[in-house]
Amino acid sequence: MKDLAYLALETARLRGADYADVRLIRYRRQNIIAEDLNLSGFVDSEDIGLGVRVLVDGAWGFTGTSSLSREAIQQAAAEAVAIARASSSVLSRKVSLAPETAVSFTFESSCAIDPFTVPISEKTGLLLKINERLLATREVRKAGAFMTLRKDERIYVNTDGSDLQSTVVTTGAGYRATAIGDGDARSRSYMPPPQTRGYENIDQEEMYRNVERVASEAVQHLHAPDCPTGVTDLILDPQNLALTIHESVGHATELDRALGYEESLAGRSFATPDKLRNLKYGSDIVTFIADNTLEGGLATHGFDDDGVPGQRWAIVDDGLFTGYSSGREVASELGMSRSTGGCRADHWGSVPIVRIPNLSLMPGREPLSLDELIADTDDGIYIEGRGSFSIDQMRCNFQFGGDAFWAIRRGKIVGMLKNVTYQSMTTDFWGSCDAICDERSWIPDGVLNCGKGDPMQISQMTHGAAPARFRRITVGAAR
């Protein structure tokens, strides 16, 4: 197959491309959804194709094809060059790429058990059995379970001389119980972290072990009192923090947004280049590390679609804003010595764009457990899991919910609440963080369905965190 990638590359070069890269990718997908005692969704798909991206006189051209005949590949490369040449005639600003040394290697994510060799009956049986057990709890009237399995096999070559291959397997599963009564419905979920690992990441015994707790907490949620409106201290668990990190830090520090090149889907950012190394993003204990080499990380793919190997760098260091996620084009705009390797496309037929890396809140440096953090909190709310969210187009003013909410009084959890949302401004919120649990409680949760761009592209990335406390945050305003 690599000879086809090189055929496209050589055709583009002969047609006059100043730069070209080629991605030949095979995708395998299984998505299984069980609703109550029935299988409600099953997708088993395979897709393969090739994308050619070129620069001519400082303008991009791109074409993709699902036909892998030599004639179709040569035609696609020629069309990409023709598009770039036409675009260059009306160009107001020429594209330049940050330098990158040519590399050649093969990357494979950890995979002890290929998920596509596991019998479908075993996977569907697991989900249906979980739902059956959830529904055994009185007042739980709806149950849903899912499993998502992905394999991407990629060949990448460019005219700089890079020659790269990767195989990345992603696995994830979870479930939700919904209790119904008194004209209301409330849910509770179990969503262990998806990872770039094989089927061994689907821990069946652990999934079964949490069923009764999840069902019971769904019923507690149904009968819980409303959250009072006001200002209180919050303790957020790693899964809740993952989404807050994603929206208020991850998207805000994508360099294309910060430069004003990406405005779809709340696409701008307050974190503009003039604030780099000048903005206090959070308190002194807040450090966000981007790490596209993280073992099992959802954005750990060995290299990005600019041919840049995965890296580790700081986005926020001891509260100070210090870095972006970038691709080679926008890195050049900012005068960076090289890209951070954050340019990814979601399909062979999509143009690569800057995406959020594996981005994590680093654990506290002093020994601190969740129980100790709760005991140290006089009055507040402990929030687990993800719920609704909204954020403005500059990634400043936001509101988040959750999946379970526990009232804290005099250092103890005293019961569940419902209708809890918290609202703040990004730098105010992270500036209010005064305690983070240590590495024993750090969990690499993640996002499988991050949308960006127009037309939209879907990507995945990990956001690790340990439970953290935030002082005097507004809650209940949504009601």
Image (spheres, grey):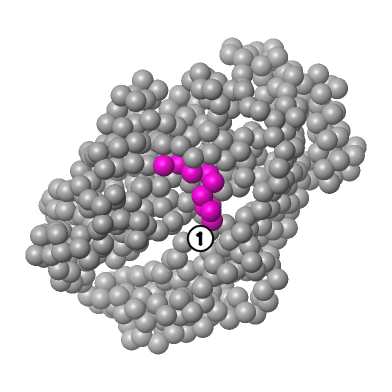
Residue at coordinates 49% horizontally, 40% vertically from top-left? 312
Q: Main secondary structure of the magenta part?
A: loop
Return the x and y of residue 25 as percentages of the image width and height: 73, 47
Return the x and y of residue 36 as percentages of the image width and height: 48, 79
The image quarter in which residue 439 lies = bottom left
Return the x and y of residue 18 as percentages of the image width and height: 74, 19
Q: Is residue 441 left or right of residue 225?
A: right
**Magenta includes 415?**
no
Return the x and y of residue 94 as percentages of the image width and height: 61, 15
Which residue is under mark 1? 194
State the SS at label 1.
loop
Residue 336 makes an appearance in the image: yes
The relative height of residue 434 versus residue 402 in the rendered view (above or below) is above
Residue at coordinates 58% horizontally, 81% vertically from top-left? 125
Instruction: Please state which amino acid type lies under the numbered disc 1.
Output: Pro
Residue at coordinates 34% horizontally, 36% vertically from top-left? 317
Residue at coordinates 30% horizontally, 56% vertically from top-left? 438
